[in-house]
Image (tube, helix red, strand yellow):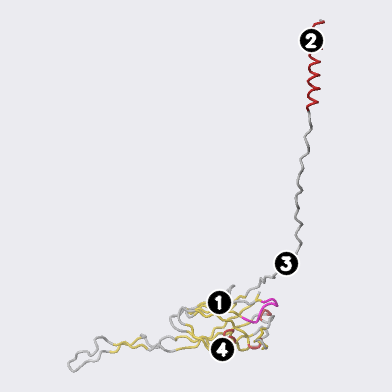
Amino acid sequence: MSNDLVKLAVIGAIMGALLLFGLLLYKPAEPVAVAPVAVAPAPETTIKEVTIVHTQSLELLDPVYSEKAVFQDDTLRVSFNASFVEEGFESRIPLWIHNVSGDVITILWDRCSIQLPGGNTVGILTEESLKYGTGPALSIASTCDLFDALIPVSEISWTDDGYDVTTGILDQGTFTVVLAVERAAACPHVPPCVETPPVLDECGEPVLPMPVKTCDCSAREVVYYTFRFIVR
């Protein structure tokens, strides 16, 4: 029994010596210096200008209804558009005319007109004529295009820098555009081409090897297209 106590005492002394030695060797770690991080200042709040997008559009009511204001027949395809400026709906109607016929067509600007929403009918001027003096009529070859804009003469004011166009007129109700178009008329002959017999000499032989066909399809006619619109 005494030997066991001596052994336990020896072991305890050794463990205590080791613990004391470990405490003497322990050295706390030095704190690590952390470099300061630069924080970018928050950007200043700026107020951006908001552009108002007009949701209104130009609709064709007659002679056919078209939400996109487009009309086509055997002579032309015409597409009308709305012109919005900061002040509102401008008294200016951009249009694109495509000649779908097989002949030349002529737009007779001096015979075109616009009936305003108030009921007054006025003549029109085109933007191209105001800028470049293109004249009262313009021809479009087959399969070709014309881009221009119609402006009621009553809605133009002249300035030192040129001209200004009113706003807030055409969107007050329905308005009507009359477009005058000159085109080839239907050939008056039935059949359209007449075959002339060949000219014979004294022996009965034809002077010309083939019969001659003559066609007189040069007749022209003026057609008035009436388009009724509304802005909504």
Few, some or many residues within 10 Å of mark 3 (<14, 14–19, 20+):
few
- First along the sequence among labels 3 and 2: 2
- In the drawing, what numbered circle is on residue 7? 2
Q: Which residues, given as a range, are shown in magenta?
A: 85-92
Marks 2 and 4, the one that precedes in the sequence? 2
- Nearest to viewer (mark 3 / mark 2): 2
Q: In this view, does 84 lie above or below 19?
A: below
Q: In this view, does 135 lie above or below 35?
A: below
Quick check: marks 2 and 1 in contact, CB under 8 Å? no
Specify the principal SS of the magenta part: loop
Kind of residue at disc 4: Gly
The quadrant of the image that shows the C terminus is bottom right
Q: Nearer the viewer, mark 4 or mark 3?
A: 3
Disc 4 to disc 3, C-alpha distance: 42 Å
As for residue 209 lying within the magenta part, the answer is no
Q: Nearer the viewer, mark 4 or mark 1?
A: 4
Q: Circle 3 sits on which residue?
A: 48
Which circle marks residue 79 in the picture? 1
Marks 2/4: CA–CA distance: 126 Å
Give SS at disc 3.
Answer: loop
- Label 2, residues with CA under 10 Å away: few <14, some 14-19, many ≥20: few
Element at badge 2? helix
Badge 4 is on which residue? Answer: 133
3 vs 1, front mark: 3
